[in-house]
Amino acid sequence: MKKLLLFLAIFSVSLLAQEITNAGFENWTQGSNGYDPDGWFTLDFLWDATQRSTDAHSGTYAAKMMTIDFSGSIETPIMYSYTPATQTYGSLNGYYKFAPSRVSDVFSISVIMYKGSSLFGIVGGNQENWKTNTAVSSFTQFTVPIEYFSSETPDSAWIIFSLDDTAETMAAGAYVIIDDLSWGSVVGVNNNALNIPAKFDMQQNYPNPFNPSTRIDYTLPEASFVQLKVYDIVGNEVATLVNEYQPAGRFRAEFNAANLSSGIYIAKLTTGSFTKTMKMTLLK
């Protein structure tokens, strides 16, 4: 069975009986920028920043993502898959090694669970990206918890790995190796959409990179006056997405950047004493 989805381009993805496509990264196919793991896609704009590695947790191969300096431009890789997920799994598990070149290098994982649609129908995911900037020299297990916002059982999921340098001036030299993915045990779910969140928070926008629109989810544990604004990289305000009093709960804002140029933008959420910012990448 194949599903078509639009993510910077239209890809055809085979949903095989095996859950988590190519979970051990054993199968690789020659692509335009080198080898890509079968069932996975990479955003390598300048160079092949995701490669096959023989340094594996098990089997023959693993996936290695690297920050690369290509003629003065820094490549920060993203690897993602739209894969089967037919139960209410409580987590995504796997093994990784991480070698940051400096403290601003961050390895992060996002999981989004769907029912019936890859563009709509979100029923769960990890509310805050699993991320680390701590070096890990031997294969170590990661566990990304999954929270469900609906009582529906998912049928598919986005799994997204990214390696980023979060400093304003980026540098190359970091890498992460990923292997042996698996879903955690099945959990019972309630309809969490009506539950009061435990804390103020803003999640990483999705999709990211984006063109021309993206969504930003945030949570309020209590009623608050909320401001959600977007700035360009030099601090100029380019959009006000929210500027109102809102009750406790979960909220989503849409940012359409059709009239803006490619680049890094900063989303800033302010609610009373709480403030959080994050980087977003617009690619046209």
Image: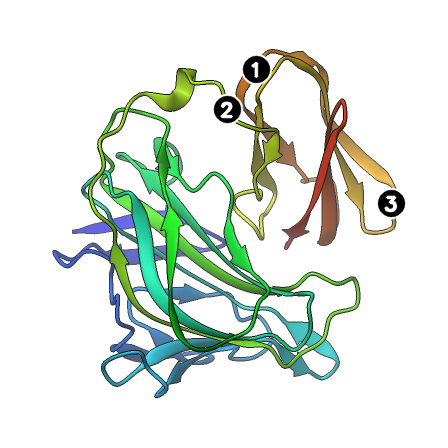
Q: Do the numbered discs 2 and 1 sit on residues whose CB atoms are within 8 Å? A: yes
Q: Residue at x 27, y 34 (%)?
A: 115
Q: Position of residue 21 (x, y in %)?
A: 24, 61
Per the rendering, the mark at residue 235 is 3
Tell me the residue that label 2 is attached to. Answer: 197
Disc 3 residue type (three-letter): Gly
User: Which one is nearer the viewer's eye here, 206 or 106?
Assistant: 106
As helix, strand or loop, the secondary structure at mark 2 comes to loop
Tell me the crowding category of disc 1: few under 14, some 14 to 19, or many 20 or more residues within 10 angstroms, Cα based.
some
Disc 2 residue type (three-letter): Pro
Tell me the residue that label 1 is attached to. Answer: 248
As helix, strand or loop, the secondary structure at mark 1 comes to loop
Chain-order first, disc 2 or disc 3: 2
Q: Quadrant of residue 274?
A: top right
Tell me the crowding category of disc 2: few under 14, some 14 to 19, or many 20 or more residues within 10 angstroms, Cα based.
some
Q: Position of residue 140 (x, y in %)?
A: 39, 70
Tell me the crowding category of disc 3: few under 14, some 14 to 19, or many 20 or more residues within 10 angstroms, Cα based.
few
